[in-house]
Amino acid sequence: MPAPPRPDRLPRRRAIGEQIRTARRRAGFSQMTVAERVGISLDNYGRIERGQASPTLDVLLGVADALSVPLSELVREE
C-alpha cells in the first residue's frame, strides 16, 4: 500500500494540477478525453487536477503526450 501524500507537498501538487488543467483547457479537451488517452479513470484524472493524487511518472508522461506539451510545462515550479 502506498504511503499517504505528505501534507507539506499539497501546495505543489495543487500547482501541478492547475498547470495540467490549464494545458488541457488550452488544448480544448475534456477531462474524460485526457483520462481515456492516458488510460486512467476519470475520477483519478480529476483527483490529479485537484492536487489530491500523486500521479506516477508514466501517468504524467501520458498526460503530456495526450496534451502534446512537454512534461516540463506540466511540472514547472514558479
Image: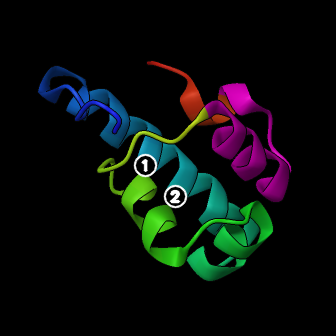
Pointer 2 residue: 21
What's the magenta region? 57-72
State the image coordinates of residue 31 (x, y, percent, origin top left).
58, 75
| Amino acid on which the number 1 mark rests in the picture | Glu
Say if mark 2 contacts mark 1, CB within 8 Å.
yes
Using the image, determine if residue 9 lies above or below residue 66.
Answer: above
**Which residue sits furthest front?**
1
Q: Is residue 75 magenta?
A: no
Which is more toward the observer, 54 or 63?
Answer: 54
Q: Principal SS element in the magenta part?
A: helix
Instruction: For marks 2 and 1, give the CA distance.
Output: 5 Å
Pick the quarter of the image with the N terminus.
top left
Q: Residue at x 27, y 30 (%)?
A: 3
Q: Quadrant of residue 24?
A: bottom right
State the image coordinates of residue 10 (x, y, percent, origin top left).
22, 33
Which is more toward the observer, 29 or 55?
Answer: 55
Mark 1 surroundings within 10 Å by alpha-carbon count, few (fewer than 14), some (14 through 19), many (20 or more): some
Q: How is the image coloured?
A: rainbow
- Checking the image for residue 44, the label placed there is none
Q: Secondary structure at mark 2?
A: helix
Pick the quarter of the image with the C terminus.
top left
| Amino acid on which the number 2 mark rests in the picture | Arg
Q: Residue at x 66, y 45 (%)?
A: 59
State the image coordinates of residue 68 (x, y, percent, origin top left).
86, 50
Mark 2 surroundings within 10 Å by alpha-carbon count, few (fewer than 14), some (14 through 19), many (20 or more): many
Using the image, determine if residue 31 lies above or below residue 61.
Answer: below
Q: Secondary structure at mark 1?
A: helix
Q: Residue at x 33, y 56 (%)?
A: 50
Using the image, determine if residue 27 lies above or below residue 33.
Answer: above
Q: Quadrant of residue 43?
A: bottom left
Pointer 1 residue: 18
